[in-house]
Image (cartoon, rainbow, N blue to C red):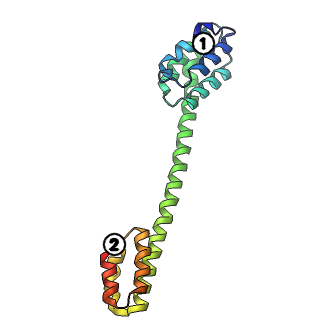
Amino acid sequence: MPEADIVGEAVMRVALLVLRSIYRKDLGPRLPELLAPLREHPPPLGMLHVIMQYIVQANDRVTEQDVATAFEAVAPERGGGNMPTLAEQWTERGRVEGLAKGLAKGRVEGRTEGLVEGLHQAIADALDERFGAEAHGLADDVRAVTDARALRAMLRAVWRAATVDEARRVVKGA
């Protein structure tokens, strides 16, 4: 449907135009044009915020500058004072999302690090239990391996090793 065929009250027209255009790559620069019907019939500020929030949440190509330009084009007397509110919301949302991703990544890395440390200790204990003082020099070689899968295989091989030389070959070969 051509944009010119979408008629009606200003807010409804803008809502339909936005819905029609939401996934366009050039939505940001086109915002002032899409919101133009609101110049003559400005909606309540809350309605304008709802429209802008929908736009920035549904289309990740729309920038703060695009929104600021659109606010200024639609309601120059109100645009500047309301941009900080949207910018603060974006900043807070970004901070919360970044924090959540960082915490999740940290938990995964922490679990992996703990698993590797536990395997290092288990291999050192197995070497000590099986071969005593003869195997003490292998601890640094064991700690040099940081892949949990390789350490599990090493632990099994150390327990199966019949001699300290066989265990040494396992550890050095990892």
What is the three-letter code of the residue carrying label 1? Answer: Met
Q: Which mark is residue 157?
A: none
**CA–CA distance in space, label 2 to label 1:** 65 Å
x, y percentage for residue 87?
54, 31
- Disc 1 is placed on an element classified as loop
Name the quadrant of the C terminus: bottom left
> Against 41, is 119 above or below?
below
Q: Quadrant of residue 116?
A: bottom left
Label 1 packing within 10 angstroms: few (<14), some (14-19), many (20+): few
Q: Which mark is residue 1?
A: 1
Residue 38 in sight in this render: yes
Horizontal side, residue 166 vs residue 45: left or right: left
Horizontal side, residue 133 vs residue 80: left or right: left
Name the quadrant of the N terminus: top right
Horizontal side, residue 122 vs residue 140: left or right: right
x, y percentage for residue 85?
58, 29
Label 2 packing within 10 angstroms: few (<14), some (14-19), many (20+): few
| Residue tagged 2 | 144
